[in-house]
Image (cartoon, helix red, strand yellow):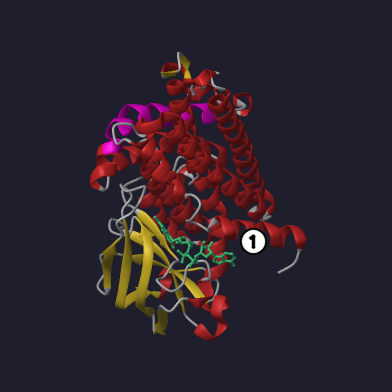
Amino acid sequence: MAASDASQTGPSLLLSSEQEMIRQTAHDFAQNEIAPIAAQFDETGEFPSETIRKMGELGLMGIEVPEEYGGAGMDTLAYVLALEEISKADAAHGAIMSVNNSLFCYGINRFGTEAQKQKYMRAVASGKSIGAYSLTEPMSGSDAGTMRSRAVRDGDFYVLNGRKSWVTSGPVADYIVVFIMTDPRKRHQGISAFIIETRQPGFAVGKKEPKLGIRASATSEIVFEGHRCPAANRLGQEGEGFKIAMTVLDAGRIGIASQALGIAEAAYEAAVLYAKEREAFGQKIGQFQGISFKLVDMKTRIEASRLLIYQAALAKERAKNTGQRFTLEAAMAKLFSAETAMFCAHAAVQIHGGMGYSKELPIERYFRDAKITEIYEGTSEIQRMVIARLETGLR
Ligand SMILES: Cc1cc2nc3c(=O)[nH]c(=O)nc-3n(C[C@H](O)[C@H](O)[C@H](O)COP(=O)(O)OP(=O)(O)OC[C@H]3O[C@@H](n4cnc5c(N)ncnc54)[C@H](O)[C@@H]3O)c2cc1C
């Protein structure tokens, strides 16, 4: 059994030369510049500003954003290939990249005005600014309709008050797409979306979250106290926020699936190498069926994840012409890839024995990082709920 080289994995015959090129660019950057610093940034929890800036220069922060708005103008397959490579070196860099690309830029490209695209999407897609997405609140996670933050119209402005939680890149973001209640009586239909500028008064970064994994991706609460957001910064119509949030999450989930795939592959490749080197009872541990069958299950799930991700990426591409949703494909890709990442990281720790538990190797980091993919952008339970509803038509 040979752990595959990045450039050989998957049905690469399907890929165009442009897609191969971005994958190779992301692979080289990830292995040369991110992998060597990943452990240190995981340890300190410091935000990796320098490598993120360079990723912007390489066009990795707005891969699907049209070139006229500062992006790379590529397709979804190019995006997932690049995100997988970055996450394979470090899932925290993958999280930051995924938020900029799918949670911030995708929503503005899809629902924003020309002025919003020029001012906000251009800055984030080119990597000059950092974007974030804020739906969750302390008392409202999976059930967004219960959010308590409020935006009240005041002439040409909305006045925002409330506390949002778990904002990836919250402490460093220049701009955040925030979902906030404009009409609480309507629950989900009363949510609206706004693009807010974090340097304006009435905005503050709240408690920073100390985390199990993806520690170099800064996560915090954000607090609004009389923040005046221009009505021109509303994304979509009043009351359209929930629809926008869910549409954006469909795109985001394909990204998280790719992040999970990268973590799973890193864990698998390390496990294969170790199984071929480590000896016990006079033979390589990979010769024990108990170990080799684990490797087989890891590899098979990885390749199945890849195909689900490609299917979802192609569904999202088709949607650009047909306008059809790709909710089912995105949810299945995210659900299966996240559970594969967890499965592979768990197996990799076991195959490494004591060394899997040691900070000297990255295996324990893969294990800690994998868990988040089953939680954010909709937990695995929520993905199952989405898939069940779509398949049965029952609610
Ligand atoms: C590191 C990190 C980064 C994050 N980044 C962001 C971000 O950038 N922006 C943002 O808006 N949010 C972000 N989140 C929030 C994340 O999306 C939520 O944590 C997640 O959606 C779950 O919400 P919750 O934590 O409130 O859990 P809850 O909704 O309270 O769920 C608790 C448990 O109940 C289960 N559950 C809930 N409803 C059901 C149901 N109907 N059926 C079965 N089980 C159910 C859940 O699956 C879970 O197991 C982040 C979270 C973390 C940990």
Question: Which residue corresponds to mark 1?
Answer: 385
Prevailing SS of the magenta stretch: helix
Q: Is residue 231 above or below residue 18?
A: below
The residue located at (53%, 46%) in the rendering is: 338
Q: Give the range drawn in magenta.
A: 18-39
Q: Can you give x and y, in whole percent of width and height, for residue 217 in the image?
A: 33, 49
Q: What residue type is labelled 1?
A: Met
User: How packed is label 1: few (under 14 Cα within 10 Å), some, or many (20 or more)?
Assistant: some
Left or right: residue 290 compared with residue 283: right
Residue 26 forms part of the magenta stretch: yes
User: Looking at mark 1, is its residue's CB closer than 8 Å to ligand 1?
Assistant: yes
| Figure quadrant of the C terminus | bottom right
Q: Is residue 79 above or below residue 279?
A: below
Residue 269 forms part of the magenta stretch: no
Question: Is residue 26 visible from the viewing direction of this image?
Answer: yes
Question: Is residue 2 visible from the viewing direction of this image?
Answer: no
In front here: 149 or 101?
Answer: 149
Q: Can you give x and y, in whole percent of width and height, for residue 80 in the image?
A: 52, 39
In front here: 271 or 161?
Answer: 271
- Please tell me whether mark 1 sits on a helix, a strand or a loop: helix
Which residue of the protein is positioned furthest toward the front in this rendering? 281
Q: Can you give x and y, in whole percent of width and height, for residue 252 in the image?
A: 51, 52
The residue located at (27%, 65%) in the rendering is: 207
Q: Is residue 188 above or below residue 308?
A: below
The residue located at (45%, 40%) in the rendering is: 72
In front here: 47 or 353?
Answer: 353
In front here: 166 or 370?
Answer: 370
Q: How many marks?
A: 1
The residue located at (47%, 16%) in the rendering is: 284
